[in-house]
Amino acid sequence: MTPDIRVQREDFDQGHELSKFSARNPLSGAICSFTGQMRDFQGHDRATGKIITAMELDHYPGMAERQLQDLTREAQQRWPLDDICIVHRFGVLKPTEAIVFVATASAHRGDAFAACEFLMDWLKTKAPFWKKETGPGGTQWVEAKESDESRAERWQSRS
Amino acid sequence: MNILYFAWLRERIGIGEEAVSPPDTIQTVTQLMDWLSQRSAGHAAAFADRKLIRAAIDQIHSNHSLPITGAKEIAFFPPVTGGLA
């Protein structure tokens, strides 16, 4: 099935996305999904103690969709997948809203799990989205993490 | 060719997009950054630290040594930070 790829400003319901995805793949025994959501900082980030009141995602229209399509092609070459769905937000995000949703359908769980993790790891280092956080001290762009690069790189040597 | 800027590059330069016609001597992404840096103080500030800049030629991730010949759209941006926190 042609992957369902959406880059959108609107919030979405991950439960509804997963139900739709399962329904359109009745022959797949394994459905795996991942949702990234904006944490409810309740004033400050648990990890850094930083106060964050708003988050906004900038993106490169056109290239974002194209990169996600390339990633799904790469995943389909590596694993026997029946279907893939990726939804990625841009614009202003509120706490607890979903940022990204990835789902994979396959005959067996191993392939569905692996492909879903691969898609998230590669998406984080290749898809053209940039996060900006706002707090009392002003607004700043989030810097890329080296740990994300190394999570993506470990897939290079596999399969 | 059309040049696009995203995230803090756009903020430092003050615009998200501009049409430019670099001379034929400008052949690589690096040379294009050198040339664009001369356009304004904002451009110079945005392109100051090349390690922090990624480029895409016609929407494909491209390293700085690649040729820009024939490109219609070149984008400059920081390393991506999508997905979740």
Image (tube, helix red, strand yellow):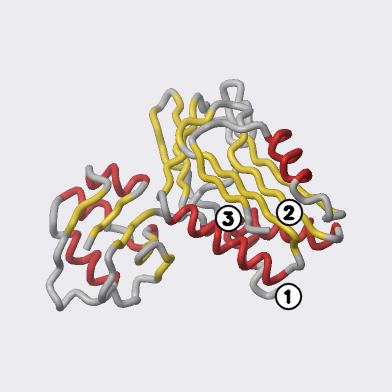
Tell me where residue B67 appears, x and y as whole percent.
Answer: 30, 77
Tell me where residue B79 appears, x and y as whole percent.
Answer: 45, 55
Specify whether B57 is left or right of B41: right
Of circles 1 and 2, the one toward us is 2
Which of the two residues, A39 or A87, is positioned nearer the viewer here?
A87
Earlier in the chain: of badge 2 and badge 3, it is 2
Above or below residue A44? Residue A117 is below
Q: Say how many tags the image has.
A: 3
Task: Give the quarter of the figure containing the C terminus of chain A.
Answer: bottom right
Residue hosting label 1: A159
Within the image, what quadrant is residue A100 found in? top right
Instruction: Please determine if labels 1 and 3 lie on a single subunit.
Output: yes
Amino acid under label 3? Answer: Leu
Distance between the alpha carbons at the discs numbered 1 and 3: 18 Å
Residue hosting label 3: A123
Label 3 sits on a secondary structure element that is helix
Residue at (23, 68) in percent of width and height: B32
Which of the two residues, A25 or A72, is positioned nearer the viewer here?
A25
Specify whether A60 is left or right of B81: left
How dense is the environment of label 3, judged by Cα within 10 Å: few (below 14), some, or many (20 and up)? many
Earlier in the chain: of badge 1 and badge 2, it is 2
Earlier in the chain: of badge 1 and badge 3, it is 3
